[in-house]
Image: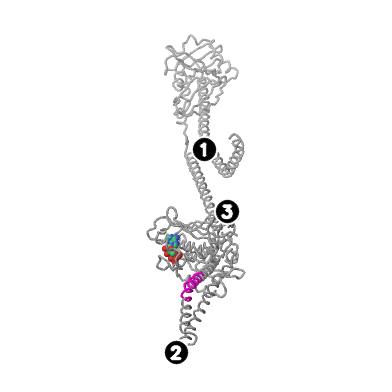
Amino acid sequence: MQDVLTAASPRWALLAFARLRSLWKRWFLWLILAVLVSALLVTVVWLAGRHEVEQVQAALDRDTADAVSDLRIGLQRNAQSLRATQASGLDRTHWPEAAATLLREHREWLRLEWRDAALRPLESANTPYRMRLIDEESRGADQTDVALACTAARKLGAPAYSPSHFVPVLGGGGVEVMELCVPIDAGGFLVASYSLRDTLIELVGPTLTRGQEVAFTETDGTRLVALGTSRRTGTRVFTSQQLIDLPGAALMLRVDGWRAAPDLFPNVLTALVTGISIALVSVLVLLARDTRRRLRAERDLADALAFRKAMEDSVITGLRARDLQGRITYVNPAFCEMVGFSPEELMAGSGESTEVPYWPTELAHEYQQRQARRLAGSMPPREGFESVFMRKDGTRFPVLIFEAPLINAQRVQTGWMSAFIDISEQRRIEELSRASQERLQASARLATVGEMASLLSHELTQPLAAIASYATGSLNMLGPHAKGEQAEVAMAVRRIAEQADRAGQVIRSVHDFVRRRDRTREAVAPQALVDAVLPLVRLQARKLGVIIEVLLEDRLPQAMCDRTLVEQVLLNLARNAMQAMDTPDNAGERVLRLRVARAVAVGGTGAGAEDVRRWLEFSVADLGSGISEEVASRLFTPFFTTRADGMGLGLSLCRTVVEQHGGVLMFEPNQPRGTVFRFTLPAA
Ligand code: ADP
């Protein structure tokens, strides 16, 4: 078992590998196509998505840049308007009014201060729009943010800003503030404190804060103030930030925009592409399935075709198809072999004329008419008809033809289909069997006549002898010297005696002639004897439904006999046996057993104690009606028969023949019923 496994597994593996390879070959292109289409679709969807994202991002960047430029312009204008307050000269009396006007116009400012060159506050004003946030005490000269801004402003000779700083409010919270310092011509500075949050509100368009978050951050990203809608969950964030660099300070403007839920189909284009992709993949799948179905159908068709071809090639019946014009459209190999023409010769020959090369020239006209009748629609006989064809070498042979209309799938007749059986061999056997039957029948008649002659001669000898002795007696009574009428009577009686003697001689010579057959003895194999009668026996057996069983012992010696007579004996016994089984009340099986064996001891006419010849025993057993006591006692009597058409000579002839050979003929009941007839013959 182990060995089988190890021997089988490499072969199995090879087979599996080969199968895998063919599968791979078949599906390789489909696989590549599927992968490419999927890759294409994924790329297109991804590109569409990215294009969308880029567009959103670009719009945001544009908005942010606009906002930054708005801011920058706004801040610049603020610085200019602050600077403009000193144009008419600053004095303490006008300060409160001027400052109030400015603070009203610029709500992003929390406070205005006028400081001297040493940054000491001279005047100040707080915005009326807010609670006071900045206390006066802490706004001294050493206020760092203001100092930083003003130092830068002095250096530049232009407005400058401080970095943002946090101003806490009482009760928690606070405000991010940035200082603007503008140097004035008379020495000193004007300082405006920006609330970063209000700057966003005032200087950035309200559209930007709609749906987005706008914030100021430090350059490192720390968020200072923010404005606008805060982010909703399930959204995708787009961020854009740009630097606003101001003299003395740098701020970042950061805008966070978001799109509602990161869509699977962000826009129509992507949806369209996705839809087309799905359709494409579906078509691909359908196509693959269709191809698989086609492949299977192709394989089935190829199998069916191969099977049909094998069938056509191996069938021994000749097949031929003709179209409705009588041209041959198909012939199978068996037909070609039968007539000796190649398919090309057969089909080319029927180009214009419908005459074919296998028609015997002398019958072509008749066949032509037959074909014309067929093409005109006359139906051929179902049981077929016989015809004669001609082989390529010119020899004629008989064929049995079966013809039927050729109906196509649309149930329309497209021609005629014919099957041919070469019956020359069948004819030869029939001829042979008929000849041997005639021979046997003739010899049977002869044997019967012989037997009758022999019987007659036997039966007639005595009356003739009686006639002769009566004639002699009469002559004696008339005396040698009879005169007149007596002499005439004596003459007639002498003639009677002469004629009786002649009749005796005729009978004896006939008897001698019949017995002369004794001399025609020869050594014949038992098999040959049996084979000679079997065809005739079988013929009758088929008619009566009898099964024949033949049993010959191995290595039997030959029989020394008159072949024709012994065949006659066998035939007679077999016929009797079959007739005995052919009764209306015999419902059992009908079996005739013909057996030839070596016989050990034999009691025969010529057999004595000194008889050391070997013998053969032939037996014919039937399952028939059997032989009753009454019939048995008269069985071998000449002319005894129980059948209406019987002669009653069969068995007596058999006995004569067997006894002439020195053998014996006997019979006994068979088991379970019927009779066994046995006879012996000397071995050669
Ligand atoms: P025939 O066959 O002409 O009748 P046969 O001499 O061959 O003359 O046979 C004589 C009779 O013997 C037959 O009519 C039949 O009644 C009987 N007989 C012969 N063979 C058998 C047998 N095998 N079984 C039964 N009866 C038989």
Q: Above or below — where is 517 with respect to 186?
A: below
Residue 587 placement: quadrant: bottom left
| Magenta segment includes 285 | no
Which one is nearer the viewer's eye here, 555 or 632? 632
Residue at the image position 61 percent from the left and 68 percent from the top:
392
Please tell me which of labels 2 and 3 falls first in the chain: 2
Residue 209 shows in the view: yes
Residue lying at the far top in this picture: please name it.
137
Q: How many marks?
A: 3
Q: Which residue is mark 2?
A: 485
Whole-percent x, y for residue 21 in the image = 60, 42
Q: Which residues are magenta?
A: 447-465
Q: Above or below — where is 495 with respect to 112?
A: below
Q: CA distance from mark 1 to mark 3?
A: 93 Å
Please tell me which of labels 1 and 2 falls first in the chain: 1
Of discs 1 and 2, which sits in the foreground?
2
Q: Which residue is mark 3?
A: 554
Instruction: Kindly tell me whether mark 1's CB lies below 8 Å from ligand 1.
Output: no
Q: Amino acid at mark 2?
A: Glu
Q: Amino acid at mark 1?
A: Val
Q: Is 452 left or right of 396, judged from the image as shown?
A: left
Crowd class of label 1 (few under 14; some 14 to 19; many from 20; radius 10 Å)? many
Q: Above or below — where is 501 with respect to 257?
A: below
Q: Which residue is mark 1?
A: 45
Please tell me which of labels 1 and 3 falls first in the chain: 1
Of helix, strand and loop, which one carries label 1?
helix
In the rendered structure, find residue 257 and report the number of the disc placed on it: none
| Magenta segment includes 462 | yes
Q: Amino acid at mark 3?
A: Asp
